[in-house]
Image (spheres, helix red, strand yellow):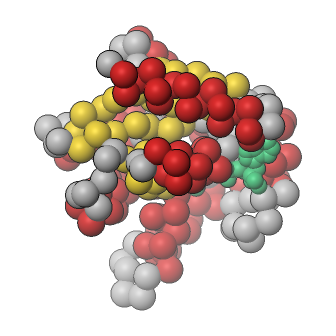
Amino acid sequence: MYKVVFVLGPPGSGKGTICAQIQENLGYVHLSAGDLLRAEREREGSQFGALIENHIRNGSIVPVEITCSLLEIAMIAREDANGFLIDGFPRNEDNLAGWKRQMGEKVNEQFVLFLSCPVDVCIDRCLHRGQGRTDDNVDSLKKRVDTYNQSTFPIIEHFEKLGMVREVNSERPVNEVYADVVKVFAAANQQ
Ligand SMILES: Nc1ncnc2c1ncn2[C@@H]1O[C@H](COP(=O)(O)OP(=O)(O)O)[C@@H](O)[C@H]1O
Ligand SMILES: O=c1ccn([C@@H]2O[C@H](COP(=O)(O)OP(=O)(O)O)[C@@H](O)[C@H]2O)c(=O)[nH]1
Ligand SMILES: [Mg+2]
């Protein structure tokens, strides 16, 4: 069984930043669904490049079969891992249902780390992220925030009802956010 922590929050809430630090210090392997999709978009011979780019620009969500397969392949490649941080997934009902179908029997879902941050702060961070992403522009960001509110927040609520959500306010400086996140992991791993 793979041990899994889902990391969710609005675009720009700091998911990638915090996951990189957890990977570095706590030995979980960081798998960003967005990074895996961008790599697949660039892969020579991929049938999905154009479809992925359309979804990314529109802030809409790629069909789960594609994303989930990329995640599973990445997990199989790191079977030695202590656990996995699944960053930015599941983002909607389709993602959740597809994940349960494909991975339900193979994973132990530890908890959901929810990085909460006001949308205006998040948008400002994305506009200054400086990674040259095709979706870090005002138009795409509006759509991404709409998708987050309409489709992703309900997934967080779903996990909340199951008692699985650990919320950390990520509006604060990274070191303060990280200190609280470490406490969440320490508590979860004591059980
Ligand atoms: N707590 C924070 N305070 C200020 N800036 C942050 C913080 N966390 C992340 N950032 C910056 O905001 C941008 C988005 O962060 P990132 O980790 O890529 O977020 P996400 O993966 O949730 O979109 C990056 O430029 C990052 O350096
Ligand atoms: O499971 C996922 C994760 C990401 N995306 C797409 O990839 C984009 C960027 O996602 P990422 O997590 O990299 O953005 P972030 O929240 O980190 O800014 C999203 O807007 C979606 O279009 C997707 O379709 N499914
Ligand atoms: Mg990210």
Task: Judge by depth and name the residue closer to the eye, 60 or 160.
Answer: 160
Outermost residue to the bottom: 44
Q: Quadrant of residue 183?
A: top right
In this rendering, is residue 186 above or below 36? Answer: above
Quadrant placement of the C terminus: top left
In this rendering, is residue 39 above or below 139? Answer: below
Residue drawn at (37%, 80%) of the image: 46
Res. 174 in view: yes
Residue drawn at (20%, 46%) of the image: 102
Residue drawn at (74%, 32%) of the image: 176
Residue drawn at (74%, 71%) of the image: 132
Outermost residue to the left: 105
Residue 5 appears left or right of 61? left
Task: Judge by depth and name the residue closer to the eye, 154 or 88.
Answer: 88
In this rendering, is residue 181 above or below 145? Answer: above
Task: Judge by depth and name the residue closer to the eye, 102 or 24.
Answer: 24
Task: Judge by depth and name the residue closer to the eye, 21 or 84.
Answer: 21
Label total for image: 0
Residue 104 appears left or right of 36? left
Residue 123 locus on image (x, y percent)? 80, 44
Quadrant placement of the N terminus: top left
In this rendering, is residue 44 above or below 149? Answer: below
Residue 120 appears left or right of 111? right
Residue 95 locus on image (x, y percent)? 37, 42
Res. 155 in view: no
Residue 12 locus on image (x, y percent)? 71, 45
